[in-house]
Image: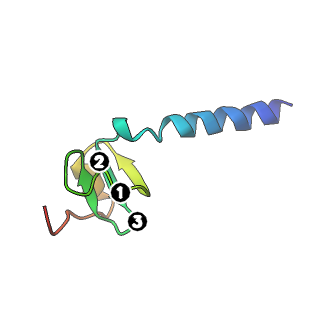
Amino acid sequence: MKNLFAKIFIVLILLQGCDSASVPVKKSKTNICHKKGSRYYDITKHYKAYQTIKDCIKSGGRMPKRQ
C-alpha cells in the first residue's frame, strides 16, 4: 500500500512540472532551444524544460536558425 502511495506521489510531482506556462525555455527533441515568446515556443509539445537559455545550450541544445 505504501508503494502505491509513493508511485501516485511521484506521478503528481511529475505532472506538476509539466505546466508549460511555467517553462521559460523548451528544448525540443531535435535539440533546439525555444525561449518563451519565440516563434515555435507554443507549438513545441515534446520538450525538456530549462530555466535559462544558457542552461539549455549547455545541455547540448542550440538556438533556432530562424528567429
Q: Is residue 43 above or below residue 4?
A: below
Q: Residue at x 64, y 37 (%)?
A: 10
Tell me the amino acid under the disc marked 3. Lys
The C terminus lies in quadrant: bottom left
Image depth: mark 2 or mark 1 in front: 1
Q: Residue at x 33, y 52 (%)?
A: 26
> Residue 29 got which mark?
3
The N terminus lies in quadrant: top right
Tell me the amino acid under the disc marked 2. Val
Residue nearest the viewer, comparing 16 with 54 = 16
Q: Is residue 47 above or below residue 30?
A: above
Q: Tell me the quarter of the picture where residue 61 sits.
A: bottom left
Q: Residue at x 28, y 50 (%)?
A: 55
Q: Residues within 10 Å of mark 1 (few under 14, many from 20)?
A: some
Q: Residue at x 22, y 51 (%)?
A: 54
> Residue 44 got which mark?
1
Marks 3/1: CA distance?
A: 9 Å
* Mark 3 vs 1, N-terminal side: 3
* Mark 2 vs 1, N-terminal side: 2
Q: Residue 16's spot in the image, x, y percent?
A: 51, 34
Q: Is residue 35 above or below residue 67?
A: above
Residue nearest the viewer, comparing 42 with 17 = 42
Q: Is residue 28 above or below residue 16?
A: below
Element type where label 3 sits in the image: loop
Residue underneath mark 2: 25
Q: Residues within 10 Å of mark 3 (few under 14, many from 20)?
A: few
* CB under 8 Å between discs 3 and 1: no
Q: Residue 42's spot in the image, x, y percent?
A: 31, 50
